[in-house]
Amino acid sequence: MRDPKSKIQNPAVQTFLKALLLAGLALMLYSKFSSGALAFYINQRFVWLVFVGVLILAALALTMVYRLIEQRAAIEQGSAARGHRLSWPAVILVSLPILIGLFVPARPLGASAIASRGIGLSAPGGAGGNAIVAQRAATGPKNILDWLRAFSRESDPAAFAGQEVDVIGFVYRDPRNAEDQFWVSRFTISCCVADAAAIGLLVETDQASTLALDSWVRVAGRLGVGEFAGERLPVILPDIIEPTEQPEHPYLYP
């Protein structure tokens, strides 16, 4: 049975806390929107929905402020103000994600997430992708996802030998990697981080053991044929491995 003492008895206090929580949620989401940190959580095509949510939450908070003014007027006139009962555990439960969102720095998924999910050797969503993506990959620089789509259309890894490659990703090492191997990796998301999938291109270089896990690097060179976990696949034989800044949008979108 619920403890009645956990309920907030004063209707004005209840309304004030509701307004505060709604405003806090709006502020937290707007801070992620304005800082660009939403790119760490959702696909960019859904960012506008978050902005709409911010406007709705702000409007609801203002509604609670208006209701609070009405309740205070009713109390002054001797009428009993009514409201839905709010409990302290509910206030704490809603406050926690607001506080975490406001004060804990946002970070994109990295190597530690790959360790629990595994790394994909093929492109999410199949080999083709949509027409716009396919056209971009054919006419412009290929990213990791574009290369994996291309690999999916050819059964022989040797077909890509000698082709130039220039990609950006973060460093990941699988326990099954040889000492001279690492993955230049990215995450793909279709909707949000809940459906994130790790992908990467295998790199063979004597520098592999010197690169810091999770560090962002640009890898440029040519493709050759290598092996990972008993499977033949294209590998990057790099001419250049250099540190680079984390991209503004760290995820790739199938």
Image: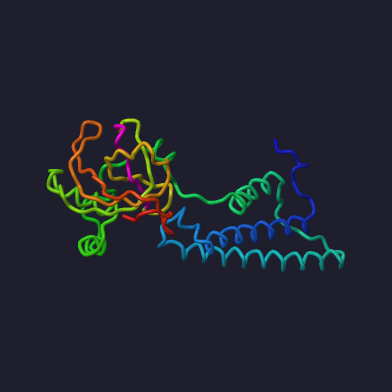
Query: Residue 249 or 13: which is nearer the viewer?
Result: 249
Can you tell which quarter of the image residue 146 is in? Answer: bottom left
Residue 112 is covered by the magenta coloring: no
Q: Check the image and report above or below for 30 versus 7.
A: below
Judge left or right: residue 149 versus residue 77: left
Q: Check the image and report above or below for 196 versus 117.
A: below
Which quadrant, please, contains the N terminus? Answer: top right
Q: Position of residue 69 (x, y in %)?
A: 77, 68
Render colour scheme: rainbow
Query: Residue 118 or 201: which is nearer the viewer?
Result: 201
Can you tell which quarter of the image residue 229 is in? Answer: top left
Q: Position of residue 138 (x, y in %)?
A: 20, 61
Identify the main secondary structure in magenta: strand
Residue 181 is covered by the magenta coloring: yes
Judge left or right: residue 38 versus residue 237: right
Residue, x 15% and y 43% (percent of image)? 157
Q: Position of residue 240 (x, y in %)?
A: 30, 50
Judge left or right: residue 57 versus residue 7: left
Residue, x 65% and y 61% (percent of image)? 23
Which quadrant, please, contains the C terminus? Answer: bottom left
Region rendered in magenta: 178-189
Judge left or right: residue 109 versus residue 223: right
Q: How many marks?
A: 0
Residue, x 35% and y 44% (percent of image)? 198
Residue, x 47% and y 63% (percent of image)? 49
Q: Position of residue 45 (x, y in %)?
A: 40, 62
Query: Residue 223 or 135: which is nearer the viewer?
Result: 223
